[in-house]
Amino acid sequence: MSIPNTAPTKPATLVRWATDVEKSVITANCEKRPGWVRGNIENDDWNFYWTSVFTTRSIFSLETGYRLADDQIISHFPNHYELTRKDHMVRNCKRYRKDLEREGNPLADKDEFGRYVYLDFLPQTYILPADYNIFVEEFRRNPSSTWIVKPAGKAQGIGIFLVNKISQIKKWSKDKAGSQQIPHTKDVYIISKYIPDPLLIGGKKFDLRMYVLVTSYTPLKAYVHTQGFCRFCTVKYTASLNELDNLFVHLTNVAIQKHGEEYNETHGGKWSIKNLRLFLEGTYGKRASDKCFDEIFWLIHHSLKAMQGVISTDRHCFELYGYDVIIDEALKPWLIEVNASPSLVTTTANDRMMKYDILNDMINIVIPPGEGVDTRVKRGPPKVLGGFEVLCDEEQRLLEAKQFERRDSRAGNKGKSVKRLSTWK
Ligand SMILES: Nc1ncnc2c1ncn2[C@@H]1O[C@H](COP(=O)(O)OP(=O)(O)OP(=O)(O)O)[C@@H](O)[C@H]1O
């Protein structure tokens, strides 16, 4: 047998990758991909750029006048904040519902109490200072409820507090703005109805972090990952007013909980979505668990539909969002917020594996294995989904509908209306 005297050939360079977020789950993922080499940001020598939102903002700013080339893609949409800033997200979702209502779309039907039947997935929310007077009216109608105040543009639980009296808001606004009243406060906040009856596991409150990839808004192409996790509070939940200030009871953010005495560094107060589903199935039955998750997919889908026409589809952009959802004790999910840069910090071994897998699956969708970047090429549905599931592919759906129509007309059914069941996909 003859031994070849040439060294194995290196795979041709397919993708030059770059990042300004030096997290090992990103760099390790890019480094191991055949044909991927590290590019150079300074020389604009890159095809795939995993950036922070700040870099994206500067790349797309008018001052920079930068134009992305056909072989460059970047990890945020230019105006992603329409979904990921708390006040914009709420405003856009409310406008979406109103638009559907105006069109007479049955999706925007309301019940006898004036609540949306299908699109009631946001806790009642007002933007401060703009909606202050409407909030006060609402508060007076329901004086026994608790509200949560959050700065619109911050994360990790910073600046969040709970209130149950108007006087607390007045005092807070005075402290913030000196002698001025809330309508003059410079910073934007949102104030949301506090979900008083969250589903508890082991007596503790938790929320879900789900990962959602969007590769296009119009047509909408979105994928949701089967991995994700629940973040638990370290202290048992109580709705007692005496504990309103106790953030370890009410806020599930790891950034808050890790300072608690009960914080466990091995599991980091986290549970996989898979475990949650098993728990729900075991406790409430499979139907109830599936229904709860279908409702989660539904709310993700409609929060994205609300961004169509608002977030500009740019063929150079994709985005991986971190959706925060709370399930209440009736197993109804509520959308809390959407993060543009879900944390890639890994606090436990499981965390590291999960985040690595999600990024790996995401890259396989955005740049299929063995291919380079060419934003002019229209790709069909992804061949490798990994742990992602298709949440919505409007292009594919349109194609299928056309094929269906053609088949139908060939079969002589032209003109007859064909009713098809619609699912959340
Ligand atoms: N309406 C609500 N009802 C009950 N709990 C809520 C509500 N809104 C927020 N919370 C709790 O407060 C936490 C922080 O809220 P939120 O995620 O909006 O803020 P954040 O500071 O941006 O957090 P993140 O770091 O996840 O971006 C949530 O994880 C949840 O536990």
Image: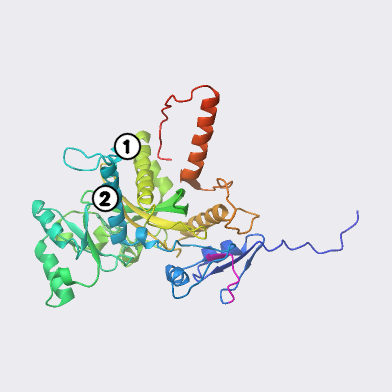
Q: In the rendered view, does 172 fall on the left or right side of 225?
A: left
Which of the 4 image quadrants contains residue 101? top left
Residue extending farthest top = 412
Secondary element at tag 2 = loop
Residue 164: horizontal and vertical position, in percent?
13, 59
What is the three-letter code of the residue carrying label 2? Gly
Write down the region rendered in magenta: 43-49
Q: Quadrant of the C terminus?
A: top left
**Eye-nearest disc, 2 or 1:** 1
Is the CB of mark 1 within 8 Å of ligand 1? Answer: no
Mark linked to residue 318: none
Q: Is residue 329 magenta?
A: no
Secondary element at tag 1 = helix
Q: In the rendered view, does 83 fall on the left or right side of 399?
A: left
Q: Is residue 48 magenta?
A: yes
Mark linked to residue 203: 2
Does label 2 or label 1 sit earlier along the sequence? 2
| Residue 326 versus residue 45 in the image, above or below | above
| Residue 106 versus residue 324 in the image, above or below | above
Majority SS type along the magenta span: loop
What is the three-letter code of the residue carrying label 1? Tyr
Query: On the image, numbered disc 1 is attached to which residue?
Result: 284
Which of the 4 image quadrants contains residue 240? bottom left
Front-lying residue, 141 or 288 = 141
Q: In the rendered view, does 374 fall on the left or right side of 88?
A: right
Residue 29: horizontal and vertical position, in percent?
57, 61
Residue 13: horizontal and vertical position, in percent?
68, 64
